[in-house]
Image (spheres, rainbow, N blue to C red):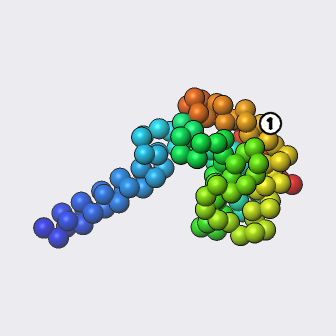
Amino acid sequence: MAAEEQRARSDALALGDALAACYGEFGEQPMPILSMFYGIVVRMYFFDDKQHHAPHVHAECAGDEAVFAILTGEILAGNLASGKTRLVQAWIEIHRNELMDDWQLAVNGEETFKIDPLR
């Protein structure tokens, strides 16, 4: 029985870690998906105005993740393949005003709007 209890405890801890990753460090809502295109998922955290000190989005693709500044398109943290980086930067350029509107909503914990993908 002890091995079975240990396995159950380990499974519970793994589930807790997975939920923390989905719901954020402080238990806020999951990070909403703003857009998806060419295998890239773009998200914005709620209440995320402290870490990078600039309006930004998180882009994920093939296991890689990067944080992009909305105002400049520059990478603040992380890394994506160069072709994917250029796609995200082009998308940011096209949708900058919508992204800034979503940023204001997200930092106040309000629901964001979906943004059209890059076509």
Does 104 appear above or below 9? Answer: above
Outermost residue to the left: 1
Q: Categorize mark 1 by other alpha carbons within 10 Å: few (<14), some (14-19), many (20+).
A: few
- Residue displayed at 24% across by 60% down: 9
Residue 68, percent across and down? 68, 52
For residue 49, which quarter of the picture?
A: top right
Residue 101, percent across and down? 73, 32
- Residue displayed at 64% across by 42% down: 54
Q: Is residue 75 visible?
A: yes
Q: Is 110 positioned to the left or the right of 75 in the image? A: left
Does 65 appear above or below 72? Answer: below
Does 20 appear above or below 87? Answer: above
Which quarter of the figure is the N terminus placed in?
bottom left
- The residue wearing badge 1 is 97
Residue 20, percent across and down? 41, 50
- Secondary structure category for the residue under label 1: helix
Foreground: 37 or 96?
96
